[in-house]
Amino acid sequence: FVRNGKPVGEIEGFSCQIVADEGIHWLKNWREQEKPFFLHVCFHEPHERVASPPELVEKYLDKSLYEDQAQYFANVANMDLAVGKLLKALDEMNVADNTLVFFTSDNGPETLNRYGKGSRRSWGSPGVLRGMKLHIYEGGIRVPGIIRWPGNIKAGQEVDTPVCSVDLLPTFCEIAGIAVPDQRPLDGASLLPLFAGKEIERSTPLFWNYYRAYSTPRVAMREGDWKVVAHWSGPEGVIPLGGNVNAVSQSFIKNAKLTKFELYNLKDDISEQHNLAWQEQKRLDTLKKKLVQKYAAVQKEGPLWDTSEYDQSREKPLIKKSVK
């Protein structure tokens, strides 16, 4: 662990509990008590398996193929307990009613499909969803979204409206009663209408663009129940493998074109097994036009990094693949 830029050395305890305790310590001792606060809490579990209490591992042994799978399940359970500890602390400090807690993840699960069963490394499961981490199919981008705000949201509600992390800034701004920054276009929309049982007014469809995607599609857009995905085509059909952002990949990102579009109705086909591009040609053309325009805008504004000192020996090789 590192605190304020300095390694803290060996700490006794389990990772997520240590992180939760650190957050609680800050809440009780370091924040300005009468002012609004922001606390960002990130857990290691279950990105990679770390130690969990033996009693939790024991609990899942009879539900697992191997002990390391039980350790993965125990990681999830222990993280759940750590989150509960944080929520209890907010209750005890009498700030829960006016504190919005948003629990989510950065991507879908790692699965055995990535490393192979022999590795026993990743035991996450996307369930019926297609894909996994590093994919832009639902298994890669659909993550938990749980909100707690006792003073403003009735507990136990379920909402099926898709939202994204880009919606957080507009939401926080509206809660704080300030204008959303207008220095550049922002894609997100405030989530406050959802809290009141209303629909979100979204001016820009949800959009995903991931050059490192392990599945061939790299770009996706969702509007309502419909999702369109697209593959990349670059100079001579060269597609870089997932890896660091370097001079080669930056050039590809800036010049790649969209091709080979797929269309799915997520209401009827959450597993994305039925590509309706041919049956819904008119709808595809409409969504395709919006996606191409959005992609071009992102491509134009996207930043570049100085790679002059980049260690070329670390570059991953390119794979040549014909894309039509």
Image: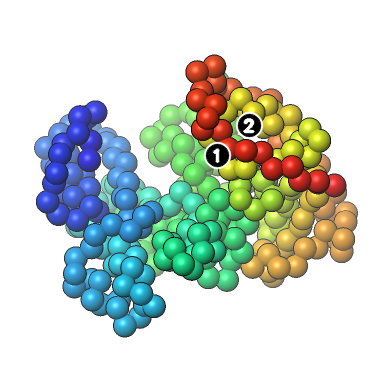
Q: Residue furthest front?
A: 313
Residue 229 seen by the camera? yes
Name the residue beneath numbered marker 2.
Answer: 249
Q: Which residue is mark 1?
A: 243
Given residues 77 and 226, the one toward you in this image is 77
- Dividing the picture into quadrants, the one containing residue 77 is bottom left
| Left-right relation of 78 to 202 | left
Residue 131: x and y, percent?
59, 60
Residue nearest the viewer, comparing 303 with 24: 303
Give the residue type that dot 1 points to. Answer: Gly
Asked whether the beta carbons under mark 2 and mark 1 sit within 8 Å of each other, the answer is: yes
Task: Give the residue displayed 48% in from the left and 28% down from the top.
Answer: 179
Residue 243 lies left or right of residue 81; in this view the side is right
| Image spot of residue 317 (x, y percent) | 62, 38
Q: Position of residue 114 (x, y in %)?
A: 53, 59
- Count of numbered marks: 2
